[in-house]
Image (cartoon, rainbow, N blue to C red):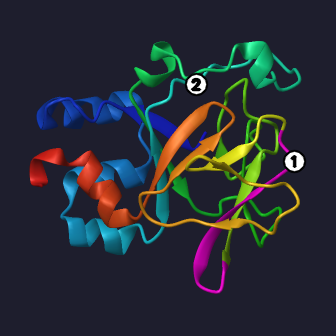
């Protein structure tokens, strides 16, 4: 699993004590223990950082459509601890793209009923990160604009808001991610 949750609003000492209990990925621990410059050097990739509560599916099943879920961002979804995903390649399949979906064979795994098994993917094109729709049921969004499944993808940049089904994130470069995890350092 490539995401773990950390309460970024907790006091620094509480966050540090919670690290072993949460089993956070090395990049999160690195952000809490190192300087900004050290973190950027150690983690030279983008992150998806969000506050949406994931709603795990009960066993294998088709993706729930937003209209059947009563698709609104509910307080229950937005009251969750922060979810942090490193946008990086970890699987050997599809070497030219970073896949995102509900199943464990994706590079970025989001166990949520509104996320398709293969929902979207990231790739670098001309030195620019872009996100493309993978044929999902509930869509991929950059800001308020839906990414067309027939398009080659949409360029994304630091601080863009991305949504996959009902799960919303902010795209952050390594420096901005460190800033978000270390509010006392601002």
Residue 58 seen anywhere in this rendered image of the structure: no
User: Which region shows up in magenta?
Assistant: 125-136
Mark 1 and mark 2: Cα distance apart in space: 20 Å
Q: Residues within 10 Å of mark 2 (few under 14, many from 20)?
A: some
Farthest front residue in view = 144
Q: Residues within 10 Å of mark 1 (few under 14, many from 20)?
A: some
Could you tell me residue 16's position as x and y percent? 21, 37
Check disc 2 and report the residue beneath it: 54
Name the residue rendered at 17%, 29% in the picture: 14
Instruction: Identify the image quadrant of the C terminus.
Output: bottom left
Q: Would residue 76 appear left or right of 94 to someone viewing this image?
A: left
Nearest the eye: 79 or 19: 79
Q: Would residue 177 appear left or right of 85 to someone viewing this image?
A: left
Name the residue rendered at 59%, 46% in the picture: 144
When the figure is inspected, residue 99 is found, relative to residue 67, above or below; the finding is below
Instruction: Identify the image quadrant of the N terminus.
Output: top right
When the figure is inspected, residue 128 is found, relative to residue 2, above or below; the finding is below
Residue 32 seen anywhere in this rendered image of the structure: yes
Could you tell me residue 103's position as x and y percent? 77, 37
The disc at residue 2 is none
Could you tell me residue 96's position as x and y percent? 77, 73
Q: Would residue 126 appear left or right of 97 to someone viewing this image?
A: left
Check disc 1 and report the residue beneath it: 135
């Amino acid at each position: 699993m490539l995401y773990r949750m950390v309460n970024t609003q907790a006091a620094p000492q509480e966050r540090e004590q919670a690290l072993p209990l949460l089993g956070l990925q090395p990049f999160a621990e690195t952000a809490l223990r190192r300087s900004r410059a050290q973190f950027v050097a150690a983690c030279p990739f983008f992150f998806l950082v969000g506050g949406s509560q994931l709603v795990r599916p009960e066993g294998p099943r088709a993706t729930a459509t937003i209209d059947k879920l009563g698709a609104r961002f509910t307080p229950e979804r937005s009251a969750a601890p922060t979810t942090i995903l490193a946008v990086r390649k970890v699987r050997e399949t599809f070497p030219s793209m970073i896949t995102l979906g509900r199943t464990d064979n994706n590079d970025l795994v989001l166990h949520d009923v509104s996320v398709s098994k293969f929902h979207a993917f990231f790739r670098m094109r001309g030195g620019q990160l872009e996100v493309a729709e993978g044929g999902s049921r509930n869509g991929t969004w950059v800001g308020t604009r839906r990414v067309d499944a027939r398009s080659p993808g949409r360029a994304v940049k630091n601080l863009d808001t991305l949504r996959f089904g009902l799960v919303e994130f902010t795209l952050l470069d390594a420096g901005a991610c460190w800033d978000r995890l270390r509010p006392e350092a601002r």
